[in-house]
Image (tube, coloured by chain):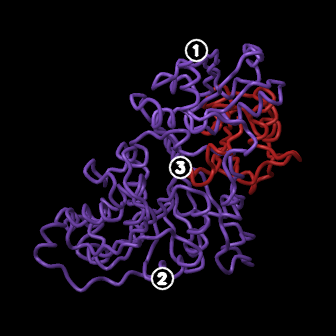
């Protein structure tokens, strides 16, 4: 990273504000001026981005760029602590900017209300000294990495899953990049996401603050940053392990003979076809209203619930529970002569169940379109959505 | 020796976070693991029997790619870590839509 040029001076207000930094030899006036001159780009104002932006603002990073195009959702509040209940429905960028300003009016916040893409990433990155990746999907991670390597900016990486996290610093001059660790993304479907697997609310807090810590260390030029080191966090066991990361001399992005010379189509790289319908179109479906009408008419319908037991406890349609993963072993419990309606949370897992049962010879099986979420929307709003 | 199972794969390994196996090499240890828990196989290996590129295996704190890969010898005090790539977050990419049962 190019050396941060110190800002010229601190006002009396700033000296008082940052006094706890100034009295530490590791920061001091020199360090605080470096923080003031630093320009850090935060990709995402969500789970990881929240603690990141909060702490970088508090620390006095002079310019904070934030990239986010999303809107605050009620389910975000469990972990995205930069947003409050009153912000539900607002743009995350507006909410984050307001909180940052309230914490530290000396911070200049530069909002980028856009999805980060191959078309805009290089231009956006150019004005910043380092990038902190708080994104939530594989294509963007590879995009951020490649753009960091191409622009010569360090990539402070953090990622989470349920109660486990990873932190490292990629794309420094002599250190590895993300592709040195993971040359290829997983094919879609092989690694579950947060919305599907859940996430312990505190986890992005823990990992996000570690990212903020690494960003500050890089700016100050102090301590030992996680370059060439992958920190693994297991929040349930409260265990921290460290693995060595090496710069791969054959890395297509940062190796001796790089083949990544420009940004590519990362969705394609990750094997995602944007237009693909999530549910196979030949899966027979029944709409929630139709099911309701049949049940009210006294028809004999067998409701099969293919969710997990802990989901059944949140809400259910009194269906017979066979989690999708157990269906192959337990399909014999079902009577193929009966009319079966399979459901899950949103209609996706149950579509797979229907396909499986059809292949097993079941002729009278249908998928509840939209799952229990759609049932709540269209038939019975007293059923909680989750 | 111990094998650390990462969170995304614990559901295929009897919900355990570490498994003990007897083995003389990394390859043997992974073979033992996928024999006890066959569901892990497709998550760790391609159809051609190669370790998947987005799954890293570490012997203690060293990536086996920089050692002798699956031929790396191990002893009973060693531990293997399986470290898959994770991205957290939304259904934008690796979403339930395409999740295999």
When the figure is inspected, residue A325 is found, relative to residue A142, above or below; the finding is above
The CA span between labels 3 and 1 is 44 Å
Kind of element beneath mark 3: loop
State the image quarter where residue A286 is shown.
top right
- Mark 1 falls on what kind of element? loop
Q: Residue at x 50, y 68 (%)?
A: A115
* Residue under label 2: A126
User: Circles 3 and 2: CB distance less than 8 Å?
Assistant: no
Label 1 environment density (alpha carbons within 10 Å; few <14, some 14–19, many ≥20): few
Quarter occupied by the C terminus of chain B? top right
Label 2–label 1 contact, CB within 8 A:
no
Residue marked by disc 3 = B88
Q: Residue A300 at what x, y percent from top left? A: 64, 15
Q: Colour of chain A?
A: purple
- Label the red chain with its letter: B
With respect to residue B51, does A348 lie above or below? above
User: Residue pushed farthest front?
Assistant: A297
Seen at 20% across and 83% down, the residue is A9
Residue A298: numbered disc: 1
Instruction: Report in which chain the residue with disc 3 lies.
Output: B
Q: Chain of mark 1?
A: A
Q: Secondary structure at mark 2?
A: helix
Q: CA distance from mark 3 to mark 2?
A: 27 Å
Query: With A239 as the anchor, is A206 left or right in this view?
Result: left
Instruction: Tell me: residue A65, above or below residue A91.
Output: below
């Amino acid at each position: 990273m190019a050396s941060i040029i110190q800002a010229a001076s601190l006002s009396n207000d700033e000296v008082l504000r940052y006094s706890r930094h100034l009295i530490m030899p590791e920061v001091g006036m020199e360090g605080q001026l470096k923080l003031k001159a630093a320009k850090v780009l935060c990709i995402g104002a969500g789970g990881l981005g929240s603690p990141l932006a909060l702490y970088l603002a508090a620390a006095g990073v002079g310019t904070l760029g934030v990239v986010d195009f999303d809107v605050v959702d009620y389910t975000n509040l469990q972990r995205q602590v930069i947003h409050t209940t009153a912000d539900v429905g607002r743009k995350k960028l507006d909410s984050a900017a307001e909180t940052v300003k309230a914490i530290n009016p000396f911070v200049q916040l530069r909002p980028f209300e856009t999805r980060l893409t191959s078309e805009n990433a290089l231009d956006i990155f150019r004005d910043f000294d380092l990038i902190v990746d708080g994104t939530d999907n594989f294509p963007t991670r590879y995009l951020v990495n490649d753009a960091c390597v191409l622009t010569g900016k360090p990539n402070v990486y953090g990622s989470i899953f349920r109660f486990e996290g990873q932190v490292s610093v990629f794309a420094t001059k002599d250190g590895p990049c993300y592709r040195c660790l993971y040359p290829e993304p997983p094919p879609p479907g092989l690694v579950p996401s947060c919305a599907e697997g859940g996430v312990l609310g505190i986890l992005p807090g823990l990992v996000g603050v570690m990212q903020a810590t690494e960003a500050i260390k890089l700016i100050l030029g102090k301590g030992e940053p996680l370059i060439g080191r992958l920190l693994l966090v297991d929040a349930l066991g409260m265990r921290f392990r460290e693995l060595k990361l090496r710069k791969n001399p054959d890395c297509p992005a940062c190796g001796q003979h790089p083949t990544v010379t420009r940004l590519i189509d990362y969705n394609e790289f990750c094997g995602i076809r944007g237009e693909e319908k999530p549910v196979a179109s030949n899966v027979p479906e029944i709409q929630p209203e139709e099911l309701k009408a049949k049940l009210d008419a006294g028809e004999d319908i067998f409701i099969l619930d293919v969710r997990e037991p802990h989901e059944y406890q949140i809400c259910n349609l009194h269906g017979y529970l066979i989690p999708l993963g157990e269906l192959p072993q337990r399909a014999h419990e079902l009577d193929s002569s009966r009319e079966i309606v399979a459901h899950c949370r949103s209609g996706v897992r149950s579509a797979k169940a229907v396909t499986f049962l059809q292949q097993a010879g079941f002729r009278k099986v249908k998928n509840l379109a939209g799952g229990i979420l759609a049932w709540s929307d269209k038939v019975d709003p007293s059923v909680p959505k989750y | 020796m111990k094998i650390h199972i990462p969170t995304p794969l614990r559901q295929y390994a009897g919900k355990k976070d570490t498994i003990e196996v007897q083995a003389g090499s990394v390859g043997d240890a992974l073979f033992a693991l996928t024999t006890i828990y066959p569901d892990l196989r497709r998550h760790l290996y391609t159809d051609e029997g190669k370790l998947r590129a987005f799954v890293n295996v570490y012997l203690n704190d060293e990536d086996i790619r920089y050692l002798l890969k699956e031929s790396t010898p191990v002893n009973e005090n060693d531990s293997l870590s399986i470290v898959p790539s994770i991205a957290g977050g939304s259904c934008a990419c690796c979403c339930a839509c395409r999740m295999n049962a």
